[in-house]
Image (cartoon, grey):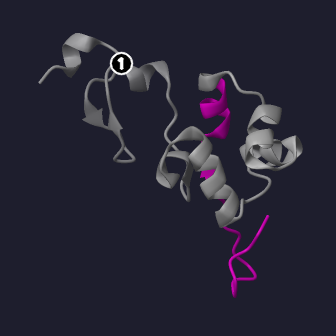
Amino acid sequence: MRKARGSEDQEIRIYNRLAMLRAERGWSRRDLAEVTGVNYQTIGYLERGDYNPSLELVFRICGCFGLPVEAVFSPRPFPRLTGDALTSGDSPDAAGTHVISASPEENTP
C-alpha cells in the first residue's frame, strides 16, 4: 500500500464503494478494468483495500460511474447500508451521514 510522502510509519488507506457500484450496474471487475485501462486484478486489489489508486485512476473510475470522487472514494470507511440503516428514519447516523428511510411515507417533508 502506498504511504504518504514523508510519513514512513503511517499508512494511508483509501476506502471505496467499487464493489457496490459495479454490482448496481451489473459490471464485472473485467468490465470496469477494460473501461479504465487497468488489469482486472487491479480492480480486485482496490476493492479489497490492498492498493491505493493514483489520482489519475481515481478520476477515470469516477468518470465511468458519473460520480464525484467523494461518492466513490474516502479516507474514512463508508457507513454500511444495512436493514437498520435503511429503516432508521431520515436522520444523521453516528458518522454524520444522512440516512434516508426505506419507507416513502417517512421521507416526505
Viewed as shown, does residue 14 lie left or right of 109?
right
Confirm whether the magenta stretch covers residue 40: no
Q: Amino acid at mark 1?
A: Thr
**The quadrant where residue 99 appears:** top left
Residue located at (67% from left, 21% from top)? 26
Magenta part of the chain: 1-23
**Which residue is the extreme one toward the bottom?**
6
Q: Position of residue 53 (x, y in %)?
A: 72, 59
Prevailing secondary structure of the magenta residues: loop
Query: Of helix, strand and loop, which one carries label 1?
Result: loop
Question: Is residue 16 visible in the rendered structure shown here?
Answer: no
**Visible residue check, residue 48:** yes
Q: As displayed, is residue 61 above or below residue 55? A: above
State whether residue 101 is above or below residue 42: above
Residue position for label 1: 87
Q: Where residue 2 appears, x then y in whole percent?
A: 77, 69
Query: Who's the residue at 35% across and 16% down the image?
Result: 102
Residue 15 within the segment the image draws in magenta = yes
Residue that appears at 74% across and 79% down: 9
Residue 34 x %, y %: 80, 40
Residue 25 place in picture, x, y as percent: 62, 24
Q: Answer left or right for 69 relative to 18.
A: left
Above/below status of 7 relative to 84: below
Horizontal side, residue 94 vs residue 74: left or right: left
Placement of the C terminus among the 4 image quadrants: top left
Q: Report how many numbered discs are placed on residues in the image.
A: 1
Characterize the local packing of mark 1: few (<14), some (14-19) or many (20 or more) Cα atoms within 10 angstroms: some
Toward which corner of the image does residue 23 lie, by quadrant?
Answer: top right
Q: Residue at x 77, y 32 (%)?
A: 31
The N terminus, quarter of image: bottom right
